[in-house]
Amino acid sequence: MIHLQSKKSGLNGTIDVPGDKSISHRAIMFGAIAEGITTVKNFLYGADCKSTIECFRKLGIKIEEQDGEIKIHGNGFDGLKEPVEILDVGNSGTTTRLIIGLLAGRPFHSVIIGDDSIAKRPMNRVTDPLKQMGATIHGRRGANYTPLSIVGSTLHPIQYRLPVASAQVKSCLLLAALQTEGETTIIEPASTRDHTERMIKQFGGNLTINENTIKISGKQKLVASDIQVPGDISSAAFFMVAAAIVNESKVILENVGLNPTRTGIIEVLQKMGASIDVKENTLSNFEPSGTVTVKTSNLQGIEIGGELIPRLIDELPIIALLATQASGKTVIKNAEELKVKETNRIDAVVKELSILGAKIEATEDGMIIYGKTPLKGGKVKSYGDHRIGMMLSIAALICEEDVYIEGAEAVSVSYPNFFEHLHYLTKK
Ligand SMILES: O=C(O)C1=C[C@@H](OP(=O)(O)O)[C@@H](O)[C@H](O)C1
Ligand SMILES: C=C(OP(=O)(O)O)C(=O)O
């Protein structure tokens, strides 16, 4: 249980948020299947990415950690060896869904487990198309839930239209497709984060992207690379919102990833009328990055839905808090995917923000928030979900009374130094 006192002063200062979680996972995975030694700088040492490292060590990959830099000794797909232990993905949906695509095509047996949250998250979105490619996967309720057991088989290419906009499903299928003879086609209903596509190119591979259709050939040789991970915009989002809603604030976030498939939060802040300035670094590498400055703002409610949703899916809990401080109504729709994250994020956000006095209601596919509403204090909980824990900690900054958060330690999943940064920005 963490106790946060209401702060009447603003947030001020410059921070570098930790490395991007999605890119950090992929850097380990591609480093493992490429030929040679991959180095990764600014890797995110959060619990989820540590789970990815441990899984790949159990698959026989040598991974060294030295002075904040990671070295992965890859030896192609054949460098992965049958694990004698169960692969534990912890709380990480990304690790689970991507590693299944890799293991489905390896000639050995492996077993995947995770925590209680992972055990409730649907896996048939990846196991169904992988079975169409020839994979053998067993698990609870038709391989929809962990534990999952995978007996690697020879995979063949497919043409697959994703029923949900999910970068995890797309990435899983790309990792499987790389192991086939022939060309796989993946069609997305809306564009989702493209870190896997960028990474394949960064490691010397090829794929073609035409609007939402991706074509990739199998049996490509991937070569080791040097990866500089930009800061995670999903982590930066908490302090962008904090600066916008707390009086007398100015926060400068440096080295933030600005991949256009992830910048929905910036567009939302702009549409709401926030004081936000974005400067892209001129020497960006394969993933663009830059500096984002946000000041205390007068905000207006807006409607958020459609193709914007996949570009800010993980930011919706903190956007809900933002909307409580915007005048008028904010409607979030087409966001039913929030129900299958670390927890049901529609229920969790509505319940916990209501406890703090927000006027917010759940809908079938999102929520409606009425602002501008002063927040009081109270006892709330994270449901073991890092993003809910961080959203409630930012909410505490504008609450009139103290806030007690149960399970706030979940922040270490994606932002281990979140409370240090919060303390630094709020100290006068
Ligand atoms: O591919 C990724 O790295 C991620 C994709 C998203 O999930 P979905 O693919 O389930 O939308 C996102 O919510 C998750 O935090 C990370
Ligand atoms: C949904 C998330 O991650 P994952 O799916 O990897 O657990 C998240 O980080 O908000």
Image: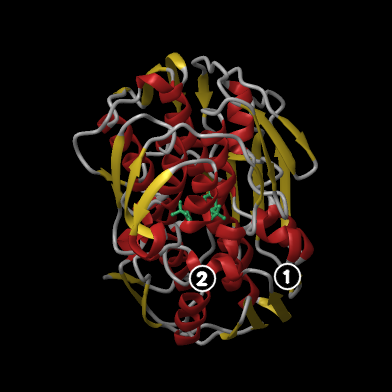
Residue 99 visible (yes or no) = yes
Where does label 1 land, which residue? 298
What residue is drawn where x is 60% and y is 56%? 240
Please tell me in which quadrant of the rendered image residue 46 appears.
Answer: top left
Say what amino acid the circle numbered 2 marks.
Answer: Lys
**383 w.r.t. 259: above or below:** below
| Place of residue 352 in the rendered image (x, y in percent of width and height, measured from the top left) | 45, 80
On-image quarter of the N terminus: bottom left
| Place of residue 291 in the rendered image (x, y in percent of width and height, measured from the top left) | 65, 40
Specify the farthest residue to the top: 36
In the image, is 364 to the left or to the right of 272?
left
Which one is closest to the eye, mark 2 or mark 1?
2
Q: How is the image coloured?
A: secondary structure
Could you say which is closer to the camera, residue 36 or residue 228?
Answer: 36
Could you say which is closer to the camera, residue 78 or residue 343?
Answer: 78
Could you say which is closer to the camera, residue 87 or residue 344?
Answer: 87
**167 w.r.t. 290: above or below:** below
Q: Which mark is residue 31?
A: none
Say what amino acid the circle numbered 1 marks.
Answer: Asn
Is disc 2 placed on a helix, strand or loop?
Answer: helix
What residue is drawn where x is 80% and y is 42%? 211
Q: Neighbour class for label 1 at 10 Å: few (<14), some, many (≥20)?
A: some
Please tell me in which quadrant of the rendered image residue 374 appears.
Answer: bottom right
Q: Which mark is residue 339?
A: 2
In the image, is 222 to the left or to the right of 122?
right
Could you say which is closer to the camera, residue 34 or residue 48?
Answer: 34
On-image quarter of the C terminus: bottom left
What residue is drawn where x is 51% and y is 45%? 130
Is disc 1 placed on a helix, strand or loop?
Answer: loop
Please tell me in which quadrant of the rendered image residue 71 appears.
Answer: top left
